[in-house]
Amino acid sequence: MCSNGCGASADRGQRRAKGKSDPLDAYAAADAVLAGRATAIPKAGDGIVESIRALHSARAGAVKARTAAINELQSMLITAPVVLREDLAGLKGAKLADTCAALEVSGDLADLADPAHGVRAALVHLARRRRTLTTEIDTLDGQLQPILARVRPDLLAVRGVGVETAAQLLAVCGDNPDRLTSEAAFASLCGVSPVPASSGRTTRHRLGRGGDRQANRALYTITLVRMSHDPNTRAYVERRTKEGLSKREIIRCLKRYIARQLYRILTHPKTQPTTRKDLAPTA
């Protein structure tokens, strides 16, 4: 897909005949636009949703870096000196990081030459990095929440939709969600369109493997929240389980239903379009 979201890309025949690379894909995309084969409307990227997308992107990067930091900390602990492993045995996640951040570290070079002190210092740095990233994530959440609450309170009011998932879904749709011609197109964009996968006497569907994977993840998160806390969804899961559907098939059905519900909200907001002036603090 071309970088501006036009949806044009080299078809499979072209790729088999001419190969695949970024320059070839760019040429094929331009050729598709000139020939009129590419009809998708790109995201506008000139409104408040673009600001939400940028903040959400920064948050996603911080979350990824925090996960890498805690994974590295836990991996380093595996080969740490016995004394450290015994002191930190049984601790995981945030509790492990908080304990490591509070460890005393000598700044003397002679001490740091000792593996016991060197590994201890590394654990402290990783733990403090995680703490810093957590603060950054909380700050970004604090910036996203009031904007979303002011711009799209109807979206946040949907059961299972939180600040992170709302920001992700808005980023997928862009500032011009009317470019999504139907709820089926939105489902396809999110990778939740049912694909026939029947064989013999078995009639079933599976989810598509295409689409925006982060939008798919957002729908999956909303589905899990509803399966845990929404009585109607839990009753649906119980009924479909008795009918013989697997958990994976039930989740597929729920994701498709949620995509249909969210499409109506995203393309027909109950609130009026909000400008930068509207977001200014009120007296």
Image (cartoon, rainbow, N blue to C red):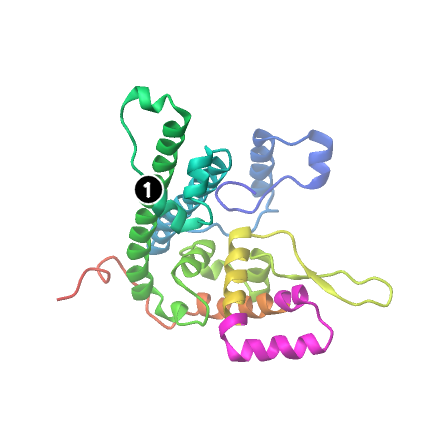
Vertical side of 262 occupied by 81: above or below = above
**Any part of residue 40 in sight:** no
The image quadrant that residue 103 belongs to is top left
Image location of residue 220, percent across then percent down: 54, 61
Q: Quadrant of the N terminus?
A: top right
The image quadrant that residue 18 belongs to is top right
Image-based side of 149 in relation to 80, left or right: left
Image location of residue 149, percent across then percent down: 32, 65
Please tell me whether the stretch drawn in magenta is mainly helix, strand or loop. helix
Image location of residue 16, percent across then percent down: 73, 34
Q: Residues within 10 Å of mark 1 (few under 14, many from 20)?
A: many
Residue 13 vs residue 190, the one in the foreground:
190
Q: Quadrant of the C terminus?
A: bottom left
Image-based side of 8 in relation to 121, left or right: right
Image location of residue 27, percent across then percent down: 58, 33
Residue shown at the point (65%, 69%) measured from the top left: 250
Residue 273 within the magenta-colored segment of the rendering: no
Residue 204 vs residue 91, the one in the foreground:
91
**Any part of residue 116 in sight:** yes
Residue annotated with mark 1: 101
Residue, far left: 283
Image-based side of 247 in relation to 172, left or right: right
Residue 235 within the magenta-colored segment of the rendering: yes
The amino acid pointed to by label 1 is Ala
Residue shown at the point (41%, 43%) measured from the top left: 87
Q: Which element carries disc 1, helix, strand or loop? A: helix
Label tally:
1
Q: Which residues are magenta?
A: 227-252
